[in-house]
Amino acid sequence: MKGRRWIGLRAALVLVVALLLQLTVVSDLRVAGVIGDLMLALVVAAGMTGGADRGVVYGFAAGLLYDLLLDTPFGLSALTYALVGYAVGLAGSALLRTSGWWPVVIAAVAGAVQATLYTSLGNLVGVAYPFGDLPAIALVMAGWCALLVLPLIRVMWWVHGHAEPDRLEVLLR
Amino acid sequence: MAISPPTGSRTRLAIVVAASVTLVVVGLQDAPVIRDVREGAATVTDPIAGAVETVTSPVRNAWHGITDYEDLENENAELREQLEEAQGGEITSSDAERQLADLSLVLELPYATDLPKVVARVVSGPRSNFSHAVQIDKGTDAGIAVGMPVATGAGLAGKVTQVTASSATVDLITDPEFRVGVRIASTGDLGTARGQGRGDPLAVDSSISPRAQVADGTGVVTSGVDRSAFPPGIPVGTVSSTRPGSGGLALEVVVEPAVDFNRLSYLSVLKWQPS
């Protein structure tokens, strides 16, 4: 078994690298003016491979790191990523025995849900994010998460070790 | 199929949600500790992000080459047309410039009489879909401080909200949280303009009488009234439409920003701070 310390270091490295790529590359690769979300895709991959526990922890950590470098309400990314990571972890566990394309579908749904959640909670705390922009944002976020989840699942395997054989087989079927 | 997470997962979720909500509440109070932590994070990451941007520029340039080609063709055609018009108008512009200079002296337009300023390059655009801030390559070393207005040659672009030694974050006027006191140039009526999101016009909440006559195309400038966060007279935009506000007690004015936020390359930080 890999030491917990090394897992923690690898996880931290992956989060920091993802953050830097998000800030420099991904934020510049706009589709219809909308930015993709590498951090969210990483959270989704974490939830898919490690269940609700890992999803919520990665969600909180990734969201908090992202919030440090944004001008948006501090903690809102942490909250929405944690909720989505938890939900993805639950869904991933529940769909363990089904087709291997489910991770892509779940990732797409997670992207759209996070955009909706962020817009809604933002309005709840007094920031008038326009709901008119939401369909485009949700669509692009869903696309990015769907595109990136499978490679990021492999990144999670590198960090935490491969899943048990039956989970691995199902994910790649 | 039943989805029943272990109790430990639910406890962990509850703790994380509670911590996140606490952070949101603290953050909304504009707590200095949050500001300091964010500035510290920016100080650490900006140099690294700059290096990563340099390394990854071929990827981003290739992406823009593919996605922006049609826009570039249209812009080329538009610029050729403007060049032809400019050449035709060159004869009359010199007279217009003289008149403007004379008028500025008479009206004492602050915006026309040069506040000290720092010109900075925009190094990155908004970092998320819900952010309306850009980063510039000058900071406290150049005399920039939080709260300073930021403009382009066209008008008001935003204000500085975060600053490190060599960089600053500029919150744009399109941010739904952005507020600026404005004056309708033709009538003198006052109001507060607020952003409505990227690509959307500003909405001016009034104070403006529903009987006010505000024609489309009328200029809107910063009001600079007592304790305003902006100096007076900076162009904000032009009126694109008006409609009765809710309750019929005031006129709602929609303002198209003067600045083209799709073409931000350089910004001028006005070294001015509210009294």
Image (tube, grey):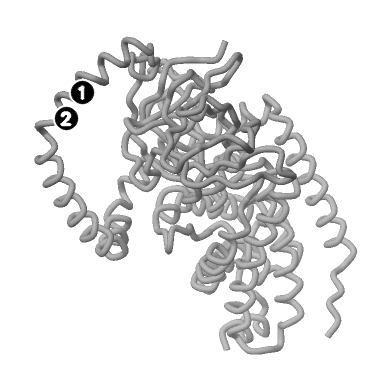
Question: Where does residue A132 sit, x and y in percent of width and height?
Answer: 59, 60
Is residue B162 visible in the rendered image? The answer is no
Q: Is residue A121 above or below residue A104?
A: above
Above or below residue B219? Residue B129 is: below
Quadrant showing the N terminus of chain A:
bottom right
Mark 1 — on which chain does it sit? B
* A105 vs A124, nearest the viewer: A124
Query: Residue B175's spot in the image, x, y percent?
Result: 55, 42
Q: Are marks 2 and 1 in contact (CB under 8 Å)?
A: yes
Q: Which residue is mark 2?
A: B93
Residue at left offset 61%, top offset 54%: A130
Query: In the image, is B70 to the left or to the right of B256?
Result: left
Q: CA distance from mark 2 to mark 1?
A: 6 Å
Q: Residue furthest right?
A: B7
Which residue corresponds to the image point at 43% horizontal and 25% vertical from the top-left? B234
| Residue picked out by circle 1 | B97
Residue at (48%, 57%) from the top-left corner? Answer: A35
The chain carrying label 2 is: B
- Secondary structure beneath disc 2? helix
Q: Circle 1 — which element?
A: helix
Q: Amino acid at mark 2?
A: Ser
Picture quarter with the C terminus of chain A: bottom right
Q: What is the quadrant of residue B4 in the picture?
A: bottom right
Q: Amino acid at mark 1?
A: Glu
- Tags 2 and 1 both on a single chain: yes
